[in-house]
Image (spheres, grey):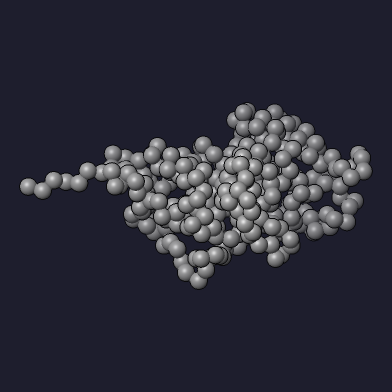
Amino acid sequence: MPEPQPRIALLIDADNAPAEKIDEILTELSTFGVIDIRRAYGNWTKHSLSGWQRKLLDFALRPMQQFDYSKHKNATDMAMTVDAMELLYTEKPDAFGIVSSDADFTPLVMHLRSKGAAVYGFGMAQTPQPFVNACSRFLYLEALGEDAPVHGAEAGQEAVHDAGQAVPPVAAPAAAQASSVARNGADRERMPVAEEPQAEAVPARPCLRVPTQELRQDTRLLNLLRSAVNATQDESGWAHVGAVGAQIGNKASFDARNYGYATLSKLLAATQAFELRDEGTSRVAVRDKRAAKAQPRPQGN
C-alpha cells in the first residue's frame, strides 16, 4: 500500500499575486504533495480581481471574501494569517503554500515552520528578502512557466551542458550584488547601480540567465555553494549534486531557476568554480576546483 502523500494548504493573497501564474504554481506545488486546501483571499467586489475570478472554478480555488476596513489599505493579509493559524491547529497540514509578495507574512511563515510545517513561498521579484529567507523554499513567479533566456555576454551560446540532477524548488538569495532591477512593465531590463550592502541587495530578474561574470562576483552565492559541497563531499572532494541541493535546502531558501538555470548542476557549471563528472546522469557529482588543485599528485616510481 503506497504511503500517503503530504497534505498542503495553499493560501493566495490575490491582491498581491498575478492570476495568470496559478497553473504554474499548482504544478510546482503538486510535486510536494496533495493540495487539498485551496483558498484565494481578497475583496472580490473590486474590479482589479476580475482576472482571479475567472480562475476560481478552473482550479477549484475557494474565494475568501475580505472587505477593506479602511481606505487605501486591505485586510487580506490579516485574514490569511488568521486562517493559516486555524488550519495549523485544526486541519494540521504538512505544509503551506503562501502566494504573496508582501513581507508582512514573514512572522507567520516563521511560526508555521517552528511548528513543523514546511512553507513554500511564491512571489514576484520585488518580494522583500526577509519573507524570501523565512520560507522553506521560495520561487520567484517570473521563473515559472518559461525558459530562461540567455543575456549579456552569454547571448547566443550555451554556457553549460545539460545535467540530469534537478534540485527542489527552492529560492535564491540576491543573485547579483552589483546589479539591480528596473521593473517597468514588459520591457523591464537589468540596469547597473552602485553597490549596496548585502542585506539590502535586490534579487536579479529571475527570468534572465545571470552570466558567469556576475555569478563569480556574487560572494554570497559562491560561499553557499562551496560550503554545501564541502559539507557533503567524500574523501576525494566529490559530492553528489543531489546531496548538495538537499544540504542547501536545509540551510537556506534557494532555487537555481531564480538565476536563470534549470538545474543546480547547470548553475554550478556556469560559475566555473567547480568540476562536474557524470553530467546528464543521476550520478552527477561536483568538486570545488580549489580542492582539486590541493589534491596531492601521485609520485612516480
Who's the residue at 65% across and 32% down the image?
110
Up/down of 136 relative to 281, above or below:
above
Near-viewer residue (89 or 157): 157
Up/down of 256 relative to 2, above or below:
below
Who's the residue at 74% across and 61% down the image?
184
Who's the residue at 69% across and 36% down the image?
106
Q: Position of residue 104 (x, y in %)?
A: 74, 38
Q: Position of residue 160 (x, y in %)?
A: 43, 61
Residue found at the very far front of the displayed protein: 194
Q: Can the viewer see residue 67?
A: no
Who's the residue at 57% across and 62% down the image?
148
Q: Is residue 297 left or right of residue 62?
A: left
Residue found at the very far left of the displayed protein: 301
Q: Is residue 57 left or right of residue 247?
A: right
Q: How many marks?
A: 0
Q: Can the viewer see residue 154?
A: yes
Q: Position of residue 92 (x, y in %)?
A: 66, 32
Q: Is residue 247 left or right of residue 278?
A: right
Say which quarter of the image contains residue 90.
top right
Near-viewer residue (293 or 56): 293
Near-viewer residue (118 or 107): 107
Up/down of 180 relative to 71, above or below:
below
Q: Position of residue 199 (x, y in %)?
A: 61, 40
